[in-house]
Image (cartoon, helix red, strand yellow):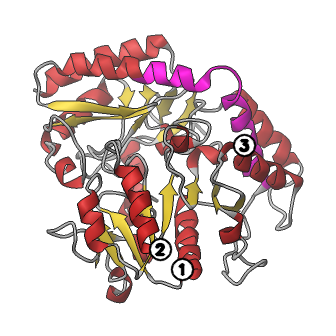
Amino acid sequence: MARMTQTSESLFARALRVIPGGVNSPVRAWSAVGGAPRFVERAHGSHIFDVEGRRYIDYVGSWGPMILGHAESSVIGAIITAALDGTSFGAATAGEVEFAERLCGRFSSIERIRLVSSGTEATMSALRLARAATGREAIVKFAGCYHGHSDGLLVRAGSGATTHGVPDSPGVPASLGALTRVARFNDLASVRAVCDRQVAAIIVEPVAGNMGVVPPQPGFLEGLREIADEAGALLIFDEVMTGLRLGAAGYQSCTSVVPDLTCLAKIAGGGLPLAAYGGRAELMKLISPEGPVYQAGTLSGNPVAVAAGLATLDRLDAGNSYGRLEESGAFLQQGLKQAMGSRPGCVQRVGSMFTLFFGPSSVRNYDEALGCDTERFSRFFAAIIDEGVWIPPSQFEAWFVSLAHTRADLKTTVKAVERALAASD
């Protein structure tokens, strides 16, 4: 009997009957741009293929981790070799020790590290540790910075950058939201207004990537370090997105600011579920079983994920990886700027992550990001997808370049953007 051909439309209809919203993570939905999501069948190198067989140049990269490109041979080989010995033991392995040593060797701010399975786990655990270390409960985050879906972090700023948090999702107790104070990214005055000696930690993406790519203004991270020290609070860098992407030590390769704790994920797992948090030994020794702060996970340090992570680190350390990524990012940025011409908007980039914003001439914080022309972006999205370029279905997300993207891919992308812009005018 012949196999029935599946389409994105038919799969989405089935998914809606058994999965909330038809997707297992809201970011995969195309509700912000209209229409049903296209379902992916496979990916290789710089390309991704949907179930109808259409090929796209991919700038989502599984939302960041595929820095080597999809199905990179050494990573796949490491996964297969590890899986043949077993996929999970619930016991310590040599691989997780080597991986922890490698990460501590890359990040001067990390003396000890704990492996977990997701970025949400990493940030949640880092904040629990910060509260235990300081004996305080309040935290400071920034509007537009996403640190996972744990209860205390699902808050928004409201009408003012200095207001206390209001839960952004039903099911989050108001009492937890009240412990989260929200400031404006790149605005130190707003941080000073909410940071006092009740605050356990300031958590920040050193380069914001969840309101689109927004780099820190000169002096901003240095100011956060100063404010945290004055208040006796810890400074946490959420490098889930930027870690291992913007340098061997993430954005910490690009700044002299040293955080107390660092959260990693995405690239660290080579495309598999793996994350970590770490910092000074005096803080990390508070983690159970050495200390009283409890955190656990059966799949933490999973041997297959660790093998993928180690293979990814090996490839990143071979040759001029970060120089090549910078060159590709700069080429695309220049090409997109030229394609935009006199249209209102900007292209903001740090290394191999960037965002094409429609409307503002620059974006420094979440308020300015919200001023973007989302209707124009939706028209552009439909046009660029039809041109065979796969980008995030949201104006407020980062695009990612991988080592698999060739100069031909980049040139093709620029031409496709030119046509998509014209089609969406």
Sequence-wise, the earlier of marks 2 and 1 is 1
As drawn, 153 above or below 21? below
- Does the image show residue 168? no
Q: Where is mark 3, residue-wise?
A: 308
Q: Dot 2 lies on which element?
A: loop
- Does the image show residue 298? yes
Q: Are marks 2 and 1 in contact (CB under 8 Å)?
A: yes
Label 2: how many residues lie within 10 Å, few (<14), some (14-19) or many (20+)?
some
Q: Residue at x 61, y 24 (%)?
A: 321
Residue 317 lies in the magenta-colored region: yes
Sequence-wise, the earlier of marks 2 and 3 is 2
Which of these two is toward me, 389 or 49? 389
Question: What amino acid type should be assigned to the residue bearing mark 1?
Answer: Thr
Q: Nearer the viewer, mark 3 or mark 1?
A: 1
Separation (CA) of disc 3 from disc 1? 35 Å
Position of 342 compared to 295: left or right?
Answer: left
Q: Dot 1 lies on which element?
A: helix
Label 1: how many residues lie within 10 Å, few (<14), some (14-19) or many (20+)?
some
As drawn, 198 above or below 59? below
Question: In which quarter of the view is residue 144 placed?
Answer: bottom left
Question: What amino acid type should be assigned to the residue bearing mark 3?
Answer: Ala
Q: Residue at x 47, y 18 (%)?
A: 327
Position of 259 compared to 296: left or right?
Answer: left
Q: Where is mark 2, residue-wise?
A: 232
Separation (CA) of disc 2 from disc 1? 8 Å
Position of 171 compared to 55: left or right?
Answer: left
Q: In x, y percent, where is residue 6? A: 46, 41
Q: Where is mark 1, residue-wise?
A: 134
Question: In which quarter of the view is residue 33 placed?
Answer: top left
Q: In x, y percent, where is residue 215? A: 35, 42
Stretch in magenta: 303-329
Q: Residue at x 20, y 40 (%)?
A: 378
